[in-house]
Image: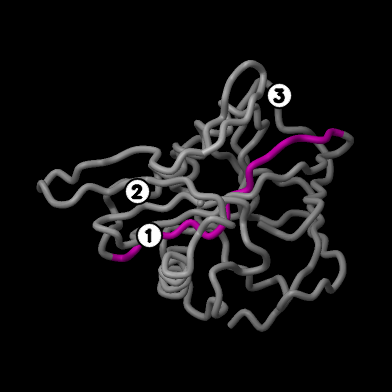
Amino acid sequence: MFSSPESERPLAAVGALSRSRGVEHRGQTCLAGRVQGVEQKRDGSDATAILRVAEAEIGRDLRQQVQALLQACFPGYPSRSYFKLPPHFRYLAMTSGVLVAQMGVELRVIRVGSTVVRTFGVVDLCVRTSERSHGLAGRLLAEVTELARSCGVDFVILFADDGRLYTRGGWARAANPCSWVKIHDHTTLGLATAEDTGSLMVKRIGQQAWPIGEVDLLGHLF
């Protein structure tokens, strides 16, 4: 698996079912803090902490946990903690020092038709098998939505075959033609295009409607 440069890139999924300083923006401060929230389990067991961590700040031990979780949730995943390129930051769900869920996020400007928009791209959302059905995936998606809103990001986008979780969270399918840079094993292979990926999902954050026209991701596929 994953021998194909782009066609077998794992789509945003919950497990096998398919990451401080303040930055001023419009008078608000977007905090890149570590602990974003704590959720106590109903049975009184250890709480789950949700952290947002810059990719460059993830140490070796935690990076190994991320890699192990990705490989457990996406069979055939490469022997590293990212698929094409590392995300800019991750949301990490930790229980007693153990990683139980993670979601990568990339900040990227993309072009849709003639309109340039600021986006967060969600990548490799996954939850440990034993921790599923507890709302963790939805919690991570809610966290990135709130961050996007506070930082003036226009849309949060992702690619998913099974969109049920994301539809419940406010995402909608988008059938725009799409182009992106093909990358395989740290090598740029050219440009890929699709009339309709069948998997692009978009969540509007501000007042701007999703534009009509071709989506140029200006980089690799999320």
Q: Residue furthest top?
A: 27
Q: Residues at badges 1 and 2 in contact (C-beta under 8 Å)?
A: yes
What element does badge 2 sit on?
helix
Q: CA distance from mark 3 to mark 2?
A: 29 Å
**Which amino acid does the dot numbered 3 rest on?**
Gln
Disc on the earlier residue, 1 or 3: 1
Task: Choose between 190 and 88: the one closer to the eye.
Answer: 88
Which percent across, then down, holds residue 83?
A: 61, 69
The amino acid type of the residue labelled 1 equals Val
Mark seen at residue 171: none
Measuring from the top left, give residue 143's x and y in whole percent.
45, 38
- Residue at disc 3, secondary structure: loop
Q: Earlier in the sequence, mark 3 or mark 2?
A: 2
The residue indicated by pointer 3 is 208
Residue type at numbered disc 2: Leu
* Residues drawn in magenta: 115-129
In this view, the residue in front, 27 or 71, is: 27
Kindly check if marks 3 and 2 are in contact, taking CB atoms under 8 A apart as contact: no
Can you give x and y, in whole percent of width and height, for residue 60 in the image? Answer: 48, 69
Q: Please give the name of the residue rendered at 72% of the width and 45% of the height, measured from the top-left corner.
A: 108
* Marks 1/3: CA–CA distance: 32 Å
